[in-house]
Image (cartoon, rainbow, N blue to C red):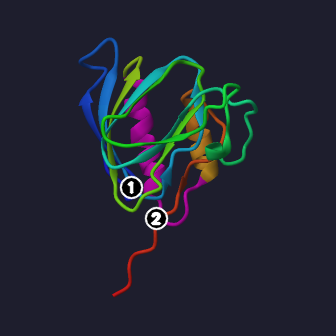
Amino acid sequence: MVTGAQEVTVKVSGEHSRTASSFEVVVPPGFDVGAHVHAHGEELFYVLEGELELLAFEPCERTSANWREWESHTGQRAFRAGPGSLMFVPPGCPHAFANPGVSPARVFFQSSPPSRHERYFEELLDVLAAPGAVDARAVERLRQRYDIEQLTPLTFTPPPRPTT
């Protein structure tokens, strides 16, 4: 599954596992998934290549402002993660990731229970493939259908191409 905004390869589907679906995700520069919460699912992110900004904690206040500015009650903030970094997200935990760099990042991603994320990714990539800016309302409606509470918007602003 590929779009200019993201590339997702299913490694283990719900058809083959009763416990989790596994994916390889290429996150392009400028992609921000937006902070969100899964009421019932849990996720695991392992950075293979590149760098991502990651967040997985309950902030002092869930605002619609930039999730990178959030802070937990213990002072935790979003962090820059490179190859070998792991983030586990239990059900009900706000989380987000973004690629602030100039190169794509490659991530091993696992979601439990299986199957739902496979269909979600297919539909999300269709929304992201539409010409023009990301349709925030379409993303919000999609997330509602998959029981995902959107806290901040998904955005994709590719860095400018170098001029020659």
In the rendered structure, which disc, 1 or 2, sits on the residue that comes first in sequence? 1
Q: Give the residues drawn in magenta, as a range.
A: 115-135
Q: Residue at x 67, y 39 (%)?
A: 70
Return the residue at label 2: 158
Q: Residues within 10 Å of mark 1 (few under 14, many from 20)?
A: many
Verify whether residue 96 appears in magenta.
no
The front one of 160 and 112 is 160
Residue 125 falls within the magenta-colored stretch:
yes
Question: In the rendering, at what x and y percent does residue 76 appear?
Answer: 61, 32
Residue type highlighted by circle 2: Pro
Q: Are marks 1 and 2 in contact (CB under 8 Å)?
A: yes
Determine which residue is flagged by label 1.
28
Q: Quadrant of residue 148?
A: top right
Q: Secondary structure at mark 1?
A: loop
For this orientation, the residue located farthest to the bottom is 164
Left or right of 129 in this view: 142: right
Q: Residue at x 32, y 51 (%)?
A: 2
Image quarter hosting the C terminus: bottom left
User: Where is residue 152 shown, x and y percent of the image?
Assistant: 65, 43
Residue type indicated by callout 1: Pro
